[in-house]
Amino acid sequence: MVQVALTPSDPLSLRSTAGALAARLPLIVMEARRIASVMSAGLHGRGRAGPGEAFWQYRNFMSGESANRIDWRRSARHDSTYFVREREWESPHSFYLWIDRSASMQFCSDHAPLSKGDRALIIGLALADLLVRSGESVALMGLTRPTASRHVIDLFAEAMIAQSAHRQDDIPDYSLTSRSEAILISDFLSPIDVVSKHLSILSALGAKGHLLQILDPVEVLFPFQGQMELMSIESDGKLDIGDAQAFRTSYLETMRNHRESLHNTAHKIGWHMDNHVTNSPASDALRNLILRMIAP
């Protein structure tokens, strides 16, 4: 009988500690920066006039406006035209990012180039960088305050190293305001009622949100044969499934039902949900997410 662990059998020794995360982060950060840099050329923020500090544009002075809005230095270059100096609109809207770093996210089969957790970190950090480039503020949910710093990737990496992974097992339970937008990246393999509870709390005050479910190829296809025994990292439990091919039909139906339940749960609160498999390019998932978020 062949034993298959759909998650690693020893999370502490395999990569769930803060020290191990610190060892992996340089390569993760490098890849996140590379993807963000490649994609940034085709993405643009939503600059518009409003309260803020950065200069945006000059426009003609309009009748009825206060004279103290006139930029006299710029207007002095023209005989009969007055100009107003507009600042770029800075939105109080903030994005809150949660990246699942629980034990189940460390699974990586022979069919994938890296674990679900590392792919989640790459997508999440690259997303934060792209949002900041688009003029947005981003927070690492439960770890940092919203920031628009150009060094957001470094700030988030340092925050994750400083906090042990086991404290990031669950989606933080606090309500986000209607001016907030949540992005949750996980395999979302917890029971649907548990996920639904967390989403209800986050969206209670009207926050928008996006779910990105990340799965390993074997979790999607279950390409096993012969007599199998599955082992779980979340407990000491084992499951003798017998013939893998016979079990596959039941497994795929269960996963399909779970995925549909996640989509329905997100839809009910007005959130979006996308799926990503780790043998696909990270840029595909990132592009879908960023285009949803920077749309006016």
Image (cartoon, rainbow, N blue to C red):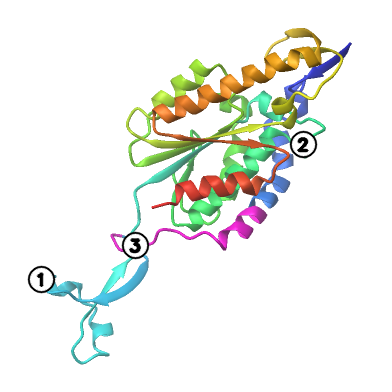
Q: CA distance from mark 2 to mark 1?
A: 63 Å
Q: Using residue 79 as the reference point, say whether residue 291 is left or right of it.
A: right
Return the residue found at the far left. 64
Q: CA distance from mark 1 to mark 3?
A: 21 Å
Check disc 3 and report its element: helix, strand or loop: loop
Label 3 Cα neighbours within 10 Å, binned few <14 / some 14-19 / many ≥20: some
Asked if 37 appears above or below 119 in the picture, the reply is below
User: What's the magenta region?
Assistant: 33-51
- Residue depth check, mark 2 versus mark 1: number of the one nearer the observer: 2
Residue 76 image offset from top left, x and y in percent: 24, 88
Q: Is residue 265 visible?
A: yes
The residue drawn where x is 33% and y is 38% is 178
Callout in the foreground (3, 2): 2
Indicate the amino acid at tag 2.
Answer: Ala
- Circle 2 Cα neighbour tier, 10 Å, few/some/many (<14 / 14–19 / ≥20): some
- The residue that mark 3 highlights is 48
Name the residue: 73% across, 47% down: 27
Q: Is residue 34 left or right of residue 271?
A: right
Q: Sequence order check: which comes first, mark 2 or mark 1?
A: 1
Give residue 64's mark: 1
Q: Which mark is residue 112?
A: 2
Q: Amino acid at mark 3?
A: Arg
Where is 155 relative to 61, above or below? above
Which residue corresponds to the image point at 50% horizontal and 28% vertical from the top-left?
263
Q: Which mark is residue 206?
A: none
Q: Nearer the viewer, residue 84 or 253?
A: 253
Q: In this rendering, is residue 244 above or below 77?
A: above
